[in-house]
Amino acid sequence: MTEQGIGARVLRKEDKRFITGKGRYTDDIRNERQAYAAFVRSPHAHARVKGIDSAEAEKMDGVIAVLNGKQLTGDGIGNLICGWGVSSKDGSPMNMGAWSALATDKVRYVGDAVVLVVAETQAAARAAAEAVIVDYEELPAVVHAVDALKKGAPQVHDNAPGNLIFDWGLGDEAAADKALKGAAHVTEMEIVNNRLSPNPMEPRSAIATYDEAEDHYTLHTTSQNPHVARLVLSAFYQVAPEHKLRVIAPDVGGGFGSKIYIYPEEIACLWASMKTRRSVKWTSSRSEAFMTDAHGRDHVTTARIGFDANNRIVGFKIDTVANLGAYMSLFSSAVPTYLYATLLSGQYDIANIYCNVRTVYTNTVPVDAYRGAGRPEACFLVERIMETAAREMGVDPAELRRANFVKSFPHQTPVIMAYDAGDFAGNLDQALEAADYKGFPARRAEAAKRGKLRGIGLASYIEACGIAPSAAVGSLGAGVGLWESAEVRVNPVGTIEVLTGSHSHGQGHETTFAQVVADRFDLPIENIQIVHGDTDKVQFGMGTYGSRSGPVGLSAIVKALDKVEAKVRKIAAHVLEVSEDDLVIENGQVKVAGTDRAMAWHEVGLAAYTAHNLPAGMEPGLKEGAFYDPTNFTFPAGTYVCEVEVDPETGTTEIVQFVASDDFGTIINPMIVEGQVHGGIAQGVGQAMLENVVYDADGQLLSASYMDYAMPRADDLPSFAIHHHSTKSPSNPLGLKGCGEAGAIGSPPAIINAITDAIGNNDLDMPATPPRVWAALNAASAKIAAE
Amino acid sequence: MYDLKYHRATSVDDAVAKRAAASDGQFLAGGQTLLPTMKHRLAAPSDLIDLRGIGGLAGIEVSGRNVTIGAMTTHAAVAGSAELAKVCPALAALAGGIGDPAVRHQGTIGGSIANNDPAADYPAGLLALAATISTNKRKIAADDFFTGLFSTALEEGEIIVSVSFEAPAQCGYAKFPNPASRYAMTGVFVAKGGGGAVRVAVTGAGGDGVFRHDGLEKALAAEWSASAADGVAISSDGLMSDIHCDAAYRANLIKAMAKRAVSAA
Ligand SMILES: Cc1cc2nc3c(=O)[nH]c(=O)nc-3n(C[C@H](O)[C@H](O)[C@H](O)COP(=O)(O)OP(=O)(O)OC[C@H]3O[C@@H](n4cnc5c(N)ncnc54)[C@H](O)[C@@H]3O)c2cc1C
């Protein structure tokens, strides 16, 4: 390891511009004669659009155009689509309802866009938007997924009868039933996974610029995957052909999944730019963000897990209803199916699993991937039910887990995934040791003296990252391949540009990717520039989500580096007149091993570009590209231990200890990895204790601002004790597993298990707010009193 | 935010005159409530009359146990006043628990009580302290001033100039913050006068805003202790229920916060 190579705590290169306010985000960009867009949005959760009167708005000062859905569809702009086809058990395809960027006949959630106003200023656009009169005929609304499936529920889309999008199953139902029937103990739970608003610090923003001279479009946008945006915008929404559309995602201030998708606003702005011949900019207000950014989670699940007399799991059966909101967002179908049910084996060797998932439409914001995407839902379920089962059976929860761990690899689960590496007991031991698990009873007794209820909870999580082998996801319905691409350009002076299809919106790629290159050629990190986020610069890319930038994106870079190195060796061997095998690359030189003969790195670059003395037949230049398609998912895993103290008077919970033992495979920059874990746990604390999207029965969003939507703050969080116990992933060249979501996946069950331990009641939903904890505690006390 | 006319008043009379001349004028103090409301387009005054340029409206005067706080005194100034801390530390602590530093350095006591948010802290303090609110026209007892959710006895165009009270022998405030907004989900201010009279005011919980709690006042007058408060039955009738918690939990918080307030006093 060099000081700046793999394993080094290199300070983030990008932070200088971020912390000095020099980052350039989409909203910072202002084009010539910039025009501004504002959307007229539905105030109703469900209504027919009977008429639109924009006469007043059109006359207002500074208004350039007032555009509606009929014009949009009339111009051939296509509907938004879900890019992952999931079929029902009976083989029928999913019932995808039409989603126009601007509603034509019906609105289906509060915030649904109806009309777009383009004006000279943002204020003029907003004022005119208020002057547009939309005649609505209100319809009854449905908000909760379980209600949407009931007979007589309001119908959200005509082509999804009973609001059912698909009724999907994975695993062998008969085998699971049989195993549960013969089980010595069965634990049954109903688990709600609460609905979350993503809240990236930077709201969504888009600037669409149509260039009449070239008949060409440029879109600056807050995207985690600009190439996918371009592909979808051209192939499905027909806003512009791919070669006439450039998508740039400059600095992006967080995404958490919510910036993967293509939203109506980007489509509408591109179209409006062509119609008005102006550059059209829209930036979401925070209120719009709450109303329109794709939400996360929202599952209601019943599950039964059975054990034999030796406490070994024999069967696990799960029935989930997942709320997808008013429309199917880009990857919405995959999240509660292939990213969820495939992980229901947890860290355990379970022979029989069956999972049924029904996805439904409701009159709420579309729901899609949010940090973890399906895996937090699976992990929460598995780890809550394991802990509860242990308590019911009177077994130490740590030991029940240990007894059921997968111990040899590769391990084929009954739900598609094949785990390739891990040491689950090693992570459990490390976490228990660090948390002083044995000393807990004494700490609980001490807390009781202070009038506090102390509890401890575990979660042994596993998740799947680095999505994913293209053929595998293709066979499961994905509309795209999930490889990644990279290009490495060594300039004539020896500096290096790496163009990657991964996108950084907070992950620190400019540093970690450069570390890998620096490590490979023993070069100073300053000489390496990471380029991303522009479809005109980078050949192609599938973007960043599911912790795939390391396992997939970096693997593509490594493949390109292999090619560069091969050529470097050939050139140096030729110039130095030695065999390639005699060369070593170190200290910025290509050296003949054991001698003082060498070419400086930049001399090799220069030789490649002057091409005065290259091996016969070699092309000039030193630039290599690669596509990498992984052989498997990667499987980060670990154990989290949370310890809490509950104040019985108010139900207030304080996290007094949080220990993580993670297996992320190879770690490139421990500081950045710790930051990812800190942020992930903070979001997990948010989900477990604070955050909740609430709609009233009419579909009005009640948690529509930070006055009512509680985000975790620094003083809600403890100091985290983060440990690593790693096995390398065999599925990519660097042995990486990914670390972006683990914290958000593993922490909620650990926290809820700790609180339920403290209060003696396993029945507690997220977010475990003080009033909920207080009520659950009282219910437990009432039960004890009655017995 | 909508377009509007901005005025900087030079005196209380000037502010009153400017407001009278406007079609739908509003006074601007710290702007910590008014400006967010305008940004959300929930308020659209035609004119803003800024009170910040008026001399003499800010400041804290303590003479013996008599305290007068100018309407334009910021929460930070109240929280940081050594004079006030000597005679009535609970009110200084209350001010120090409002919002965050940015809010405390802009927001004012006059703005807070004029707004009378049902979850604001000051109304509980002033009601329990039996404060007098002085305006450009008259003096109003706190008991008469807070008239319901976001409503006060202030007339159209009336300006709060100061609040005053006699510091009680003992007082304390305890607040259970809403986890999202950190306004009071329930806050209880207890005050025990020199003669032994006890006043208990509750904010954040009442369906009609801040109110005095008779049962707690009687129990604490009989015995000034947390355990005396613990013995009081708190009814949830008339308490608020919202997405954060129900009335039963707020009733529980009234007792819990009353106990803490007495312990802190
Ligand atoms: C993030 C945040 C957190 C907050 N947290 C809390 C909290 O925890 N607890 C809490 O109690 N409050 C909280 N607040 C509110 C804060 O205390 C405000 O300062 C207060 O509500 C209003 O005071 P202001 O000076 O800003 O008034 P402004 O917003 O300027 O005015 C409010 C209203 O009062 C009127 N007004 C102002 N001064 C006078 C006067 N002298 N005479 C007559 N009318 C007048 C105005 O016309 C306006 O209608 C918070 C605010 C924010 C933004």
Image (cartoon, rainbow, N blue to C red):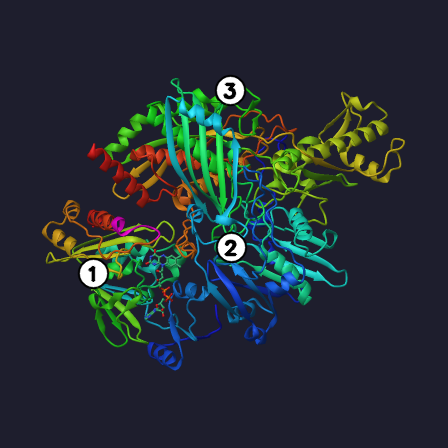
Left or right: where B229 falls relative to A478? left
| Image location of residue B118, percent across then percent down | 30, 60
Q: Does dot 2 land on a helix, a strand or a loop?
A: helix
Q: Nearer the viewer, residue A413 or B71?
A: A413
Residue designated by label 3: A407
- What range of the chain is rendered magenta? B243-250
The residue tagged 1 is: B129
Q: Is residue A743 visible?
A: no
Residue in view at x 47 percent, y 62 percent: A43
Distance between mark 1 and mark 2 Cα atoms: 46 Å
The lab-note entry on whether marks 3 and 2 share a chain reads yes
Task: Give the class, few, some or many, for how many residues have Cα within 10 Å of label 2's Cα (few <14, many ≥20).
Answer: many
Contact flag, marks 3 and 1 (Cβ < 8 Å): no
Q: Earlier in the sequence, mark 3 or mark 2?
A: 2
Q: Is mark 3 within 8 Å of ligand 1?
A: no
Vertical relation: A530 (above or below) B220: above
Mark 3 is on which residue type?
Lys
Disc 2 marks which residue? A292
Residue A717 image offset from top left, x and y in percent: 40, 41
Quadrant in the picture for residue A528: top right
As helix, strand or loop, the secondary structure at mark 3 comes to: loop
Q: Residues within 10 Å of mark 1 (few under 14, many from 20)?
A: many
Between disc 3 and disc 1, the foreground one is 3
Q: Is residue A756 visible?
A: yes
Disc 1 chain ID? B
